[in-house]
Amino acid sequence: MNIILLGPPGAGKGTQAKRLEQRYRLVQLSTGDMLRAVVASGSTLGRKAKKVMESGQLMPDDLMIQMISDRIEQPDCARGFILDGFPRTTAQAEALDTMLKNKGLKLDSVIEMKVDPEVLVERITGRFSCATCGAGYHDRFQRPKVEGVCDVCGGTEFSRRADDNEETVRARLAAYREQTAPILPYYESQGILRTVDGMTDIDDVARQIETVLAAA
Ligand code: AMP
């Protein structure tokens, strides 16, 4: 099963992708995570990516398309994958179709996670994660049970994404509105777009996605 999770930054794509990985034994392919790994490597490309990501703009299509094309050829993707953060432009969506066709693969479902734009800035600027195991938290909505200690692994170091500040978040939301939202009609016309309500709690969104996939 090959799935796309589509929605603005802060819609909960990463959280739901991790649930789907476990539930259906799929692989989460997050282009944001891939880029953060490149940034951490300190390479020339990493330095360029850091600047673009901190500005809230998008990386060039050809680079992102190549990155995903290489990744889905890895053996762990054979059972299926969840695309999280890709495609983000119409050019990426069209290239994905061609790439999948050439590899004899297809998309089973494109799931739009619909959220009220008003809540996104607070959702994003409050999030942080365990530096050891990556478990996600939020200043207001999901604090660790014991202050300063990760519920999952007991780690005591936490980190925040450099692009989760208000100014960058506003630019990321504008990029979504202008460059990514126009992809929705593209998938709608293919008859594979399904929409879930991303404003409810994490378990409920997961149930809605399961219902969509059961019918796919
Ligand atoms: P994300 O973790 O998905 O919010 O992505 C973080 C940042 O990485 C974005 O704001 C973009 O700068 C960049 N990025 C991630 N995925 C893509 C993509 N498919 N196309 C272009 N830029 C991307």
Image (cartoon, helix red, strand yellow):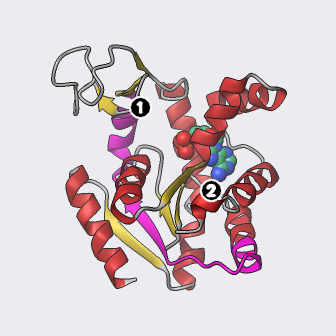
The relative height of residue 98 versus residue 25 in the rendered view (above or below) is below
75, 88: nearer the viewer: 75
**Residue type at mark 1?**
Gly
Left of 211 or right of it: where is 95? Answer: right
Q: Earlier in the sequence, mark 1 or mark 2?
A: 2
Image coords of residue 48 (percent x, y): 78, 29
In magenta stretch: residue 18: no
Quarter of the view holding residue 136? top left
For label 2, the SS is loop
**Residue type at mark 2?**
Arg
Q: Quickly name the residue at label 2.
A: 88
Q: Is residue 200 visible?
A: no
Image coords of residue 173 (percent x, y): 52, 44
Image coords of residue 7 (percent x, y): 46, 56
Q: Quickly name the residue at label 1.
A: 134
Q: Is residue 57 visible?
A: yes
Query: Where does the magenta region start and end?
Result: 97-125
For label 1, the SS is loop
Residue drawn where x is 61% and y is 54% of the image: 178
Residue drawn where x is 38% and y is 59% of the image: 20
Q: Residues within 10 Å of mark 2 (few under 14, many from 20)?
A: many
Q: Nearer the viewer, mark 1 or mark 2?
A: 1
Image coords of residue 131 (percent x, y): 43, 22
